Amino acid sequence: MFYILYGQDDFSLNQAVEKIKADLGDRETVATSTTSLEGQHLTLSELRNKCSAAPFLSSHRLVIVDGLLGRFEVKQSRPRSGKGKSGNGLGEWEGLASYIEQMPETTVLMLVDEEMKGHNPLLKKLSSLAEVRTFPLLRGRDLKAWIQQRVNEEGGDITPQAVNLLAELVGGDLWAMNGEIQKLILYRQERPIGEDDVRQLVSHIQEANIFALVDAVAEGRTELAQRILHRLYHEGVAPTYILVMITRQFRLIAQAKDLERGLSRLQIQDRLGLKSSYSLDKTLSQAKLYDFEGVKRAYDKLLETDLAIKTGKYSDKLAIELLVTELACLNP
């Protein structure tokens, strides 16, 4: 059995991995024959050795490889090559397909990765041999449907208005969303979750609004961005504070994009100076929505807005509203 799972929605991807594990048998028994490998520096020989080993106390051996496909993502028209050379940049990994065809029937191989963009030669070569599942970030109706379904699965109920507010405040980070849903269900017990419950209980609510604002801007959703901005005004948040927070978030996005690969989550969180895993997850997610040129253009707009406020060219609120609209237009 051979699976390829990739996408930005790592919550749903992780659930799919756990479901595959559960289908193989008892959790503790499967764990004795499970091997997890980091794909960034893995060799084909090492992978073959792990996949060819017989399972121990289990009917199957599960081999999970994280990040192998990402090595061959096309960047600037050139894929990263594996060891050796070949016309498509695969190097020694050209032989992975033929090995999979003769892999022991007791082995379950799983390639797990982030979002794949462009033409990936390894993905193209292996797709016909694998069960391929993609996990894009949920947005709009799909995200709201997921919230409703998740609440129902947990034995709760929620109003459409509360679903809409949760979707705006937390966005497509399903790890954070799942945590908030768990708290809301415990809080409301047998009563439906309403808008007021979300406002009272969702953690980091003002910070979440900023994240939601940057999300909407990054996705070019001007109308949603303006709605969130006006909600912040309604909650008494000063325009200058909003500018500071947007600027801070784009600084974190730039820093996150500049960090070298291979760092652990704790190392990344420490370098960014973030106190919560929630903030880290949101920042890493948003960093994927921008290239460096996009971040630079955003910084130029932020500087223009700061000067417009300080020189009195525009009122604080008008300057921020113009900024949000212009930032959203950068990513139509």
Image (spheres, rainbow, N blue to C red):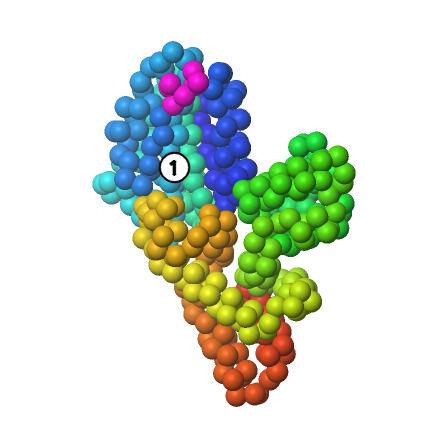
Is residue 313 shown above or below 165? below
Task: Name the residue beneath numbered marker 1.
Answer: 66
Q: Nearer the viewer, residue 223 or 159?
A: 159
Please check the rendered image and state whether residue 165 is part of the magenta-colored stretch, yes or no: no
Q: Residue at x 59, y 73 (%)?
A: 239
Q: Is residue 151 above or below residue 286?
A: above
Spot occupied by residue 121 in the image (x, y as percentages of width and height): 39, 43
Quadrant assignment for the N terminus: top left
Q: Is residue 30 magenta?
A: yes
Q: Which corner quadrant holds the C terminus?
A: bottom right
Q: Is residue 105 left or right of residue 12?
A: left
**x and y, in percent, of residue 40 in the image:** 31, 41
Locate residue 129: give its quadrant.
top left
Q: Residue 106: give x, y in percent of width and height.
A: 40, 16
In terms of depth relative to the viewer, which is nearer, 82 or 306?
A: 306
Q: What amino acid type should be assigned to the residue bearing mark 1?
A: Asp
**Front-lying residue, 286 or 126:** 286
Q: Is residue 98 left or right of residue 208?
A: left
Q: Circle 1 — which element?
A: strand
Q: Is residue 39 visible?
A: yes
Please give the name of the residue rendered at 51% of the width and 66% of the height, measured from the top-left corner: 245
User: Measuring 52% from the left and 88% from the top, which residue is drawn there?
Assistant: 311
- Which segment did they paint magenta? 28-34
**Label 1 crowd bin: few (<14), some (14–19), many (20+), radius 10 Å:** many
